[in-house]
Each structure stands twice: as C-alpha cells, then as structure tokens.
Amino acid sequence: MFLITLLLAVLPSSSRAQETSWQACHADTGGPTPVLRDCRPVEGVIDPQGRELWLRAVVQRPAGANATAFYVVGVASSEVWLNGQTLGANGRPSASRQTETPGRYQIAFPIPERLWRPADNVVVVHLSSFHGTVRLDTPIGGLIVAPYPWPERTTLLAVTFLAAGALFAAAFGFGVIHGLRRTASSLTLAALASIAGLQALLETLRALVPYAYPLHGLRLVGIWALSAAFAVLLVSYAVTRFWPQARRPLMGLALAAVGASCLAPGFDLKTVLALLIGVGLAAIAAAVAVYRRVPSARPTLAYLLAFLGVGLVFPQWLADVTYFLFAAGLLLPLLMAEVIRLGRDDQDREVALTRAADRPDCLTVASARGVERVPLSAIVAAVGADDYVELRLTDGRRLLHATRLDRLDAELPATFLRIHRSVIANFAHVRGFERDGGRHQLLMHDGAPLPISRNRLPAVREALDA
C-alpha cells in the first residue's frame, strides 16, 4: 500500500486549462462560417445526446510559448471555429442520426498562432450525438484550450501495464494450480486476476486507441461490469475462506448491493461503489475470522482496510490505478502461498504413500484435500474421470483420486476387474448382471448398476462363475 500511495503522489497532474463559460445559440449556416444568434448561458452539463448543439465562448490564449490546441473530449461529433476560422471537424455533426458521422471520443484541434488575438477570442463549437450506445450523465468530458500536445501520462500507463502483466501471470498460475488440484479457491482467484487484468486493458484503451465515440458507452459498461464481477468474486473468496457459515446471506447481500451500484449517477461512481462494496464485505468476513483467530486472516484484513483507506484519500485514482495495484498486491502473494502450500502437500503425500506401502489391504487416495487410506473392501467401483479416478465407496461417499484408471487397474488385486474402458468393479460387491435392451450392466449390492462393454462381457461371466 505504501507503493500505491507513493505512485499516486508522484504521478504528474493534468495541465491546468482555463475554465470557460459557454453559451448555447441558434446558428445560421448559409455562409462560409456559422453566424450565431439568441445565445443563452449553458446551465449544468453540456449535453448533445439526441440533439444538435451550437456553443459559443470567449477564451484567452494560455500563457507560455508552447503551441496550443482546442480539445474536445466526449461522446459527440464536433466541429470547431476560432475567430471565424475553422480548426477542423471530428466526424460530421448534424441534426439527425442519418446525416451525422460519429467522431472520435477525444480529439485535439491544433490552433495556428496567427489566429490568436490579444483578447476576446471567440470559439464556436458544433456538437451532435445520435449514435451513443448508453445515455451518460456527463456526455462531454471537456471543451478546453490547453498546451499542445497534451502531456503524456507515461508513468500512469507504465504502472497500469505492469499491474496488468502481473495479474495475467497470476491468472495463469492459478489456472495451472486448478488444473492440477481442481480446487474451487484457485479457480476463483484465477477469475479475479483475469477480470482485473482485462479491466486494466479497458482503462488504458482511451490512451492507446483513438476509438469512435459510440464505443465509449460500451467501454464504460464493460468497466463497471468487470468491477462488479471482481467485487462479487472477492466476497466469494473471502467468505468461503474465512466465514463459510455466512456464505449464503453474505453472497446475497453482495449480489444485491453490487448490482444496485448501477443506479448511481455516472459510471465512475458506479465503478468505485462496486469495488468499495466488494472490498468492504470481504473485510467483514476477514474481521470475523480475526475474531475467531483463523490463521492468515489478520494480514488479509489489514490489506483490505488499507485499500479502503487509500480509496478514500485518493478517490479520483481508485478505478484508474489503485484498484489494479491492489488486485496485483493481493493475488500475487496468494499465488506464492498457494505454490508453497502445494509443495508441502506433495511432500506430505509422498510420506503418506511410503508409509502405506506396507498396507496391501488399503488404497492410499491422493486428492486435493490431502491423503486418505481407504480399505479395498470399502471400494465398490472406480470410474475414470480424465486424469482422475472417482472411487465409489460402500458408505455412499465418492473420492476423487489423483491417478489414471490404467495405473490403478495394474495396482488393484484380482477381486477387481475392468468391465468397461472407464469402470473397474469390485466383484466382492457384485450380486449379478442383467441385460437392459442392447446393453449389459453389473448389479451391485451398494450403489447404481455399472455398464459392461461387449468385449469385456466374457471376462465378467467368467469372474461371476468363479
């Protein structure tokens, strides 16, 4: 968290741009330049969604020797004039959807130095927005005069890319662990890392790709959806690990509260609320675990509370930087801890297997939960499941054993017989076989009948006769 605070403190702030008082006008467009009339001050936000707008303002040249530009940021097509001279067009603004050509979400119109007057420079902006995918509370993010080019936010982009790379690496690591151990927690953590990495890419999209403004609404919806998914999965992981008894009510609360964040005004607020709700509920589960003295709960709670604190101090950076650093800082230590734990489990499993060598009447079952010795007499059947074997026991339990069926077939005694390419049966529990239509199946004293393949039917008959 110290790293997060330091980065937020040293990141360059945006160049200051003069505040402008805008007027909305009617326009006569018959001549080479538009003539505005009936101008009135704009109250509230500038909103061209579903209409055409003509705006006018008086601006001054920024101090300094740097070149200048007029920047338009928002979901609109635009065209700009300064002192009666056109600066350029972004798409083609118009009075209808059919005649409008969508422009980019953000565009810079460089201003030739010769167009500036000593004072009272008049800028005219023509806007329209008929192709928006969602309606935004603040469709125009900025109409400003500022130095050109705009300062590059290379530090912010570098931090975000590093966080995204670390998150995708963590997702790959947890995916490998899930493939080896089939644990639900590793799958949840892989999903958390992937979602945070995808959101990091979406956040940097605006700085990397000059996309058309209709895409911006979809991008905002995607960012909120990923934040909401991250929040719910974070709560799921925390409550499963630290407070499983409250999983159902806490997950219901998380789904309702995170879903309700979509009602907040503005997508930035929606995203921030979804994240804070998820982190807050996860912190509650961790706090309960600290009270109950659950191992590793204390550092997790401290980390979650630190994130909430940094989010309150730097709310404007929460969705841009803090969130990705938080996710990477949370998931990478968990990945390392999981790798260490799996190594220890493998060592324990090897010791248990060695000790079980002197117990021919038992099968040592290696699973994601550890090692268990199962009497051979308690095994009704073994059913193949890819790289695993499902053991069906007389007490109704089903254990997932980390081995292949072919290897297990070679280790089991003669009372076990392969009756199907994916089934081994313990004939100590067989009570007969029957034909069901064109298929044969083995009837067991415990559990459901087992399928018999045709090429193994003679061996089954011979075993039953014996």
Image (cartoon, grey):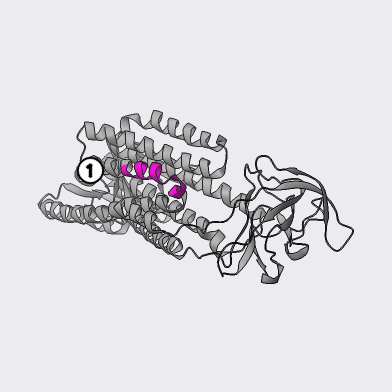
Q: Residues within 10 Å of mark 1 (few under 14, many from 20)?
A: few
Check disc 1 and report its element: helix, strand or loop. loop
Residue 398 part of the magenta-drawn span: no
Residue 275: % across, % down = 44, 42
Quadrant of res 311: top left
Count of residue discs:
1
Towards the viewer: 26 or 311: 26
Residue at 54% of width from left, 62% of height from top?
Answer: 207
Residue drawn at point x = 37 percent, y = 36 percent: 280
| Side of 401 where 25 appears, left or right | right
Give left or right: position of 107 versus 242.
right
Residue 31 in view: yes
Q: Name the residue at the right extreme.
A: 30
Name the residue nearer the viewer: 62 or 73.
Answer: 62
What residue is shown at x 51% (from left), y 41% (from top)?
A: 269
Give the vertical position of 457 relative to 91 (above or below). Answer: above
Q: Tell me residue 356's x, y (percent).
A: 13, 51
> What secondary structure do most residues of the magenta stretch adopt?
helix
Question: Does residue 309 show up magenta in the picture?
Answer: yes
| Residue 443 placement, left or right of 127 | left
Q: Nearer the viewer, residue 331 or 428?
A: 331
Q: Tell me which segment is drawn in magenta.
A: 306-318
In the image, 283 versus 208, the foreground residue is 208
Residue 431 shows in the view? no
209 relative to 21, above or below: below
Percent position (x, y) of residue 235? 38, 39
Percent position (x, y) of residue 247?
36, 32
Q: Label 1: which residue? A: 296
Could you tell whether 441 is left or right of 125 in the image? left
Vertical arrangement, residue 82 with respect to residue 112, above or below: above
Say which amino acid is labelled 1: Ser
